[in-house]
Amino acid sequence: MQRILEPGQIEALASRSVPRLRLPDRSRVFAARAERLGALSRGHALQGYLELLATLAAAQHAALQSLEVTLPNESRRAAARHHGMPVIPALGEARSSAWRGVLDALRTAVAAGNYPPAVAAACERLATRSAEALDAQADRLLAVEVAVGDAAAAPLIMAALQVYWVAMAARLVADDVGVPESSGVCPVCGTLPVASIVRTGAPYAGYRYLHCALCATEWHRVRIECTQCSATTGVAYHSIEGGSAAIRAESCDSCHGYRKIFYQEHDPAVDAVADDVASIALDLLLTEAGFHRASGNPLLWQSPG
Ligand SMILES: [Zn+2]
Ligand SMILES: [Zn+2]
């Protein structure tokens, strides 16, 4: 007797052999990003900004190496796992005051660089703000509110929060992490992905992973499916003529959203956050074509309007 599998069952069978998570490596996440930003900056139209971000990523790496964090206790982790909830939610009680120490270190590193006066001014403002004000702005940024306060300081605050969440996520093992109802948000912290990457190298080769903008966890998502609304028809790919084969935008005719997708086979050093900023020309192309970005980049704060 022939056994016919429904599409969902086929996917479930296939997914057994696919590693569903790639948890971040604290020794590499920001160091690799700093190198990548430095390489991308040379001769780039956004050279100054990419150099600034390279300095920031190097400072993130340094801060992460000495940061001690405490994970939620085992019973809370078990409850989150059981309910498919984020184990270290971006919005919740996971954050301790240690993130502000990271912010101080990042601000100091950036202020020491040779950057435009507006950058130094943003660093100075951060130095004078109260702990309560900084926590309030962090809450608004993590909640992706429209009114975020000091927009120039936002990338620095997000960078500090990234260090804090990567420190926590790097201590997890895959069995700590439940399977959320939606594959559109990070299973570890509940944040939206910045982009996706089709990986090379066993055991991830050929699989597409969404990259969390906050904790750098990557989670598997089947290819040729809208990462915002899950539509499987009307998905199209766009690239800049004459640009890198490693960078495309995946658009959707159902929700009119898009996210970028990077292909490691064409460029092994591709980094979801760095290459997303450096490929802003592709955003302009997609915007002109009537698509909206499905989610932002934590290091490229765009003021509404
Ligand atoms: Zn995350
Ligand atoms: Zn869609």
Image (cartoon, rainbow, N blue to C red):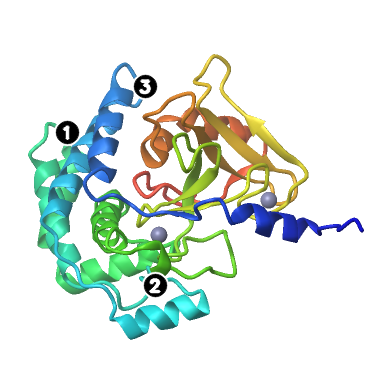
Dot 2 or dot 3: first in sequence order is 3
Question: Callout 2 environment at 10 Å: few (<14), some (14 to 19), or many (20+)?
Answer: many
Three-letter amino acid code at the position of disc 2: Val
Q: Specify the quadrant that holds the N terminus.
A: bottom right
Closer to the camera in the image, 110 or 171: 171
Closer to the camera in the image, 90 or 151: 90
Closer to the camera in the image, 217 or 279: 217
From this viewpoint, is residue 129 visible?
no
Above or below, comparing residue 80 to residue 4 in the picture: below
Question: Callout 1 environment at 10 Å: few (<14), some (14 to 19), or many (20+)?
Answer: some
The residue where tag 1 is placed is 115
Three-letter amino acid code at the position of disc 3: Ala
| Quadrant hosting residue 70 | bottom left
List x then y, in percent, for residue 221. Answer: 58, 51
The residue located at (66%, 59%) in the rendering is: 12
From this viewpoint, is residue 135 visible?
yes
Q: Most extreme residue toward the front, as rendered?
A: 1
The residue located at (11%, 35%) in the rendering is: 113
Tell me, yes or no, whether the two marked residues, 2 and 1, touch with CB atoms within 8 Å.
no
Q: CA distance from mark 2 to mark 1?
A: 38 Å
Question: Callout 3 environment at 10 Å: few (<14), some (14 to 19), or many (20+)?
Answer: few
The residue where tag 2 is placed is 87
Three-letter amino acid code at the position of disc 1: Tyr
The residue located at (64%, 42%) in the rendering is: 291
- Label 3 element class: loop
| Quadrant hosting residue 89 | bottom left
The residue where tag 3 is placed is 45
Above or below, comparing residue 56 to residue 105 in the picture: above
